[in-house]
Image (cartoon, rainbow, N blue to C red):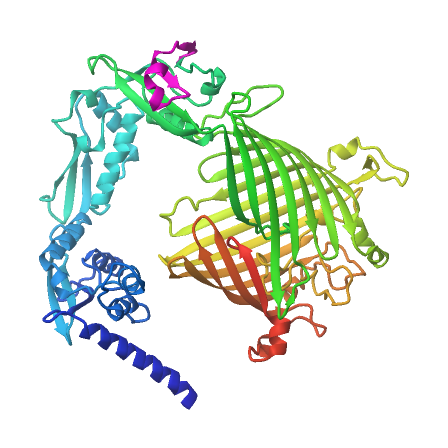
Amino acid sequence: MRKRIRPLFFMSLCLVFSACSNIKYLPAGQNLYTGATVRINPDSSGKISEEKDVKGVLEAKTRPRPNKSFLGLKIKLYIYNLAGEPKKQKGIRYWLRNKVGEPPILQSQVKIPYNNAVLTSYLISQGYLQATVTGDTIVKNRRAKAVYTAETGDRYQINKVNFPTDSSGIAAIIRTNASKSLLKPGNFYDFEVFKAERERIDDDLKQSGYFYFNPDYLILQVDSTIGKHHVNIFLKVKEITPTAALKPYTINDITIYPNYSLRFDSLIRASKPVLYKDFIIKDPRNTFKLGVFDRLVFFNKGELYNRQDHNQSLNRMVNIGTFKVVKADFLPVDSFKNNQLDVNFYLTPLKKNSLSFQVIGTSKSNNFVGSEVKITQTTRNVFRGAEQLEISASGGFEQQIRGSQQAQGNSYSLTGQAKLIFPRFLLPFFKFNSTNAFIPKTNILTSYQILNRKDYSLNAIKGEFGYDWKENIYKEHIFNPISINYVRSNVKDTTIFASSPSLRSSLENQFIIGLNYNFTYNDQVNQSKRNNIYFSADLETSGTLFGLFAPKDDQGQKSIFGTALSQFIRLEGDLRNYYKVNKKVTWANRLNLGMGYAYGNSKALPFVRQFFAGGSSDIRAFGSRLLGPGTFQVSDTLKFRDQGGDIKIMLNSELRFKIVSMLYGAAFIDAGNIWLRKNDPDRPGGQFKFNSFLNQMAVGTGAGLRVDASFFVIRLDLAFPIRRPDLPTGPAWVIKDIDFGSSTWRKQNLTFNLGIGYPF
């Protein structure tokens, strides 16, 4: 009992000492401001809807904010006071006081009348039209707290919405789209909805040519005198609206400056124009083929201006990856006297050649390397059609340490790659142009990779032809109808093949010829959402179509140049959820499922297409690719330790939280395993069975640190198993065996993971 009391006593002393220290440094006659609290209708039995949320918003709107605290300690204020007044504007004392610490927030800085007005205004904007807020301060022991009392009254609802009834074109458009109105009878009065409604109407008008209209020209008049806490709304166009905003505009001349430079503005403008369809091209250096602009500009001469064409044109010019500056000017013809607009697009290209450096973390189940660095040389506008040639070299590693020994599964890889990107679909028999804001791409890729592991090395040559396109900002498709891989393996001890025919089959030199498709949904670009989803699905086939024509060798196998043709189907799905608990805490979860089926020419999936478990971005408490399949145990005497499977189930849950500045922490739990589709006598217990697979799940847990500098993340994780399916006595929880004080337990169970990027 005494051992427990001492830490509590010490923490209490720290709290008291910190609090007292902060108070004694205050200027004479001043009190430390500790924050605000809001009481809603305290003298009334009436409750408002979502009172807790409204209270939180009101308290957050009060100013100033009190000094930041952590576990009740105002650490930054304590550091500010401890540093004292520096004599010079440099040195450790100056840095601690002005960069790390923060000055005290005093009661004298609190403006009660200002906060009363702000809180009252917010309540009125939410429909509490009779709301009043009064504030006061409470002082005790030189600490001051502000208390605001909000009397809300009843919240008003919308009774009826009246749209313009005149014969103008604007009124007709508003009435036509009235069914899309955000203002619905029965809904609560909400000023934010009013603003959104004005923006919706403005967008409808922009789609119909009203280029110079803006939401401020609309007014919503509210009549709150009709009784029963209801309002009537009258939407009108302001009488002071300029004439130019009241008429639709059509597109006149479309001029494109594809190689624009402010320095040579007069020369470029004076250059001889080239007429191409509806476009006037001024490109004295003939930088681009004229057909490029068909895919970039959505306007046509003589049509009504609309915002969708405007946005899609700009988005395509930005997304094509060729221009560093994109600007569009819309100029009225004859100074607003008619209803025509000239459009000028000013495009400043990026440099022809550039060099980039990337630090990448990988997390797919069949990736052999957890992290890599990559150098890429990019050449733009290769054939004057905005094409890009990317030549890259990358090197990767995966690092795990258990006890004092480096884990057996560590590896490195070297990759060289060339990729030619065409900003359009290249199709052999017909022409297809997409009409959304994103540029479709045709990719031609070739690469060579060397992978080295403890027991083997692999050399892989790959060639692909395919397409990459975005359906919208969230959905992306990658389809490679032609994918050719040649994999050559070098096993350092071939005697293992005598005892494992299935391993020999998966590690033979192989051709993988087929197609692959990937679909990705990712709404993380919407940072305003509290709950974000990422989903990726992969399909790969080999030998399905080509296998019909491939010749057979002397052993009856379908082969190419004496090398076996792999035949398989492989599916994988990866679902992730990121829930923001608050601004500093995120709860991340992942479900990863995979299955492969070998047939015909192949007895097993190629080794490079198998699923693996364990590793720095997987189930972190287990060695890289040393977990499974099933209950099979990878012994220390096993000559070939990497264990692949046909089926994979993995679940990860990680709580991520900010500690300070770029330093983040994480607590995680991982569960999963791999299995074989068919029984393998060389790996007993490895076959997947529906009635027992849950009992064969491995579970690990741990904690880690991340240095997140936005453009790269360094990750340090320490993990240990709490359930092991490979124990000789059968699957069992091993929580009772945890003993951090035992060096033997630590050596056998603690796994240190070093990685780049988040695990998922």
In which quadrant of the rendered image does the N terminus lie?
Answer: bottom left
Asked whether, in this view, residue 109 is left or right of residue 72, the answer is left
Choose between 375 and 326: the one closer to the eye. 375
In the rendered image, is residue 44 in sight? no
Q: Which picture quadrant has residue 241?
A: top left
In the rendered image, is residue 458 in sight? yes
Q: Residue furthest right?
A: 554
In x, y percent, where is residue 203?
29, 30
Residue depicted at 44% across the width and 11% down the height: 276
Residue depicted at 44% across the width and 29% down the height: 350
Q: Residue furthest front?
A: 88
In x, y percent, where is residue 177?
29, 29
When the figure is inspected, residue 531 is found, relative to residue 431, above or below; the finding is below
Range shown magenta: 254-279
In x, y percent, where is residue 735?
57, 75
Choose between 524 and 255: the one closer to the eye. 255
In x, y percent, where is residue 597?
72, 47
